[in-house]
Amino acid sequence: MTNAAAAARGLAPIFLVTAFALGVLVQPAQAQKSGGSITVGQELDIPGFDPLKVGVYDTSANTAAASIFDTLVALDEKGELKPKLALSWTHSDDFKTWTFKLRPGVKFHDGTPFNAQAAKENFDRQKDPANKCRCAFYISTIISAQAVDDLTLVYNFSAPSVNFPGTQTIQSSNNVMHSPTAWKTKGDDYNRNPVGTGPYVLKSWTAGDRMILEKNPDYWDKGKPYLDRITLKPLPDAQSRFASLQSGEADIIWDDEYDADNIQKAQKDSKLFVNAYTGSGAQVYAMNTKSPPLDDVRVRQALVMALDRKKMSQAITNGLAKPASNPYGDGSWVKCKDDGALPEDPEKAKALLKDYGKPVEFKMIVTATPRGRTVGQVLQQFWKRVGVNMEIEQIDQATVVPRAFMRQFQVTPWRIVDLADPDPQMYANFKSGSPVALANYANPELDALLEHSRSTADVAKRTEDYCAISRLINKEAIWFWTFQNTYYSISSTKLKGVSKMYNGVLDVSYAWLD
Amino acid sequence: MLNFVVRRLLYLIPVLAAVSLLTFLIASLLPGDLAYVILGDQATPEKVAALRHDMGLDQPMWWRYLSWLGQVVQGDLGRSFRTGQTVLQAVAERIPVSIELMLLAEIIGLAIGVPLAIACAARAGGAFDRFMTGGAFAMLSVPSFLSAILLIYLFAVELHWLPATGYVPLTEDPAANLRFFVLPALTLALAEWPGIMRVLRSDMIATLQEDYISLAKAKGLKPSRILFVHALKPSSLTLVTITGINIGRLIGGALIVESIFALPGIGRLLVGAIYTRDLIILQGVVLLVASGFVIMNFIVDMLYAVLDPRIRHGHA
């Protein structure tokens, strides 16, 4: 090879990169193509879609629901609300009533019309105490739904609900609209034969194997969807799921940062695209403030100051996980100049513990999974460096929730998931007396801030409230945060138009093949 | 013979009763109250109490066992609280996959193990025998999740010969179905053949030292005839046992292999039921699988009797 040729070859990647960057810039002009089919590799088997049966959807069910069903409101690529089954929405001055104007002419896959009455029936069915739906918990502040006329739907609330449309965007068991006729006629079989208004229709479903969705030719959003067929497959093992993507059996797979090796491998692979989205919320831990030595604020602060989240991320996720200093995260609209995060300073931690004077020993719950154990061991090491003895108690995932509810723990893992508004989770986690206020902590100032933030519409004022809440919690160190919620999918570069993973949902309903 | 079969069948009753009790106890003693699992983050004490009452969880355990057993005897194994499917529906959907996997694994295991065993026994102590015995031991120590990933990497990702994951029903496309089963069946077989080989090999070596073999040799019979006709059948008694037990063991292996290769079989059903505390499915499936295992062993006993006349006449 001549020197010139070698130089040209050396330059080639730079040209390619430039061309690629330009390609990205002009992407809006790129035409979406219709046709083709894709296979999505998911983590879990989907148990079904009937809210009365399954209660809440897991991430895999959310993905299917995003294609089979529609929500009233959706999020666009900038994270702004956009109309879906509802065209517009207004609220009363006290935010206790929300009125939605519905899109006319929308039909369920079974041909029955979607209207205010259908939406009301969806709500009533979940709310009815006789149905004992686990999903009812999340609509506890909604008193009733009214079908004022065919296309006017009203929800009435017991407490101000300033960001209700935002909370309607996740494709959850509460928010997606089912065909009332279908659940009434199919009975027990409805769970596995869902009928929605969405861009795809369920064609067939073999338990544990695959679900085939076909394009809805009568979809209200004309020209959409683009793909003819979507096949959803549960591929529970992370390694073989990634192998299926590499070998071309899957076009896109769900992933998480505990599979960091494969995500990083994919980032270097020119044929693969990593779709990462950092949402709101965080991976969090609650400390039981009624249980010594955690009843002393100095001890709690010392434990938080002893952490080094960057190192922790390196140890657990090859550095993929982003450190969190508040419960909101980069994906939230709550941006704080000062969130009151304690410094990561082992020396200060030691000083606080010296001041406390007694030896510090406690137990921490971790889930009996490889990731739970790893996190526990890393925390144990940080705390050991400042002279604290933490004993890891491994318990089964299903036991974590009851132990937390009965306050039978000293430190327990928990999760604040990505939602369009911080209120539902912040209020549940920190309002004194709430069943999930795990820290057993009561503070009138905190309660007042939580009440104020949920009854104010002004975003700037709400942000102030939430930042004050963060400062208070960080100072009192009743909970601590390790990493932000980052959601991942990996796809073949041919697959375009996959939405941001809002709420952690892999939504391929408007995707197309290039 | 009939007498023998009836006697054996009667033995099955206490065994199955014990199996049902154990199954029930295992499912009931799993940590994590079902009511909390179902209610999740809305598990207030009142709701938990109400749900426990609805589900009969507040009854004493012996009562719950007896009422469950009563329904099981009538053929009603119950319904999943998550999917609404009955246990029988769920099992019927998935058992063909697991049976096909087990049979293929066992066939591949035998296809590798039996010829190697004969070859080793024919020249016991020779270089090939020593190499294979060592090799078998090494293979026995490789866990199936490792061999599965290695096989996927080699045949699916690198060579693109076979699919990494997935499944097509046999009735839909038999050829494609087999392609999907090659790697998982091979994974299980890789852990099966060493046992088959080692057992058959030592039995064959013992048989080959019997007087009647010396007689056959003295009569001038061909060595291949002696090996395959005179030595193989009497040596295969332990092999039959091993094969029978293996079928049960393969169900355990299938838990891992079905998850890795995404096969919709019984193993995946069980794993899912354990994670989600779907106790009805868990109890029902374990009971069915354990009963299958017990019945398999019964069939093995019957096969013994066919292979060895001393057993069916009760002088064993």
Image: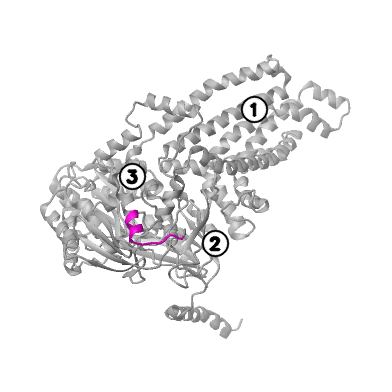
Q: Secondary structure at mark 1?
A: helix
Q: Secondary structure at mark 2?
A: helix
Marks 3/1 same chain: no
Q: Is residue A162 above or below residue A476?
A: below
- Given the image, what chain letter belongs to the residue carrying mark 2? A
Amino acid marked by disc 1: Ile
Q: Is residue A478 above or below residue A265?
A: above
> Residue A400: x percent and y percent?
32, 43
Quadrant of residue A68 within the rendered picture: bottom left
Does A114 lie within the magenta span? Answer: yes
> Residue B239: x percent and y percent?
67, 31
Q: Quadrant of the N terminus of chain A?
A: bottom right
Start and end of the magenta stretch? A111-122
Q: Which mark is residue A246?
A: 2
The reply to whether dot 2 and dot 3 touch (C-beta < 8 Å) is no
Closest to the camera, between mark 2 and mark 3, is: 3
Separation of residues labelled 1 and 2 (CA atoms): 44 Å
Amino acid marked by disc 3: Asn
Q: Nearer the viewer, residue A40 or A336?
A: A40
Q: Which mark is residue B299?
A: 1
Question: Which residue lies at the image location 54% right of the left edge and 83% below the top edge?
Answer: A8
Q: Nearer the viewer, residue A342 or A152?
A: A152
Question: Which residue lies at the image location 88% right of the left edge and 25% below the top edge?
Answer: B219
Q: Classify mark 3: residues with Cα within 10 Å, few (<14), some (14-19) or many (20+).
A: few
The residue that label 3 is drawn on is: A131
Question: Which residue lies at the image location 53% right of the left edge and 38% below the top edge?
Answer: B252
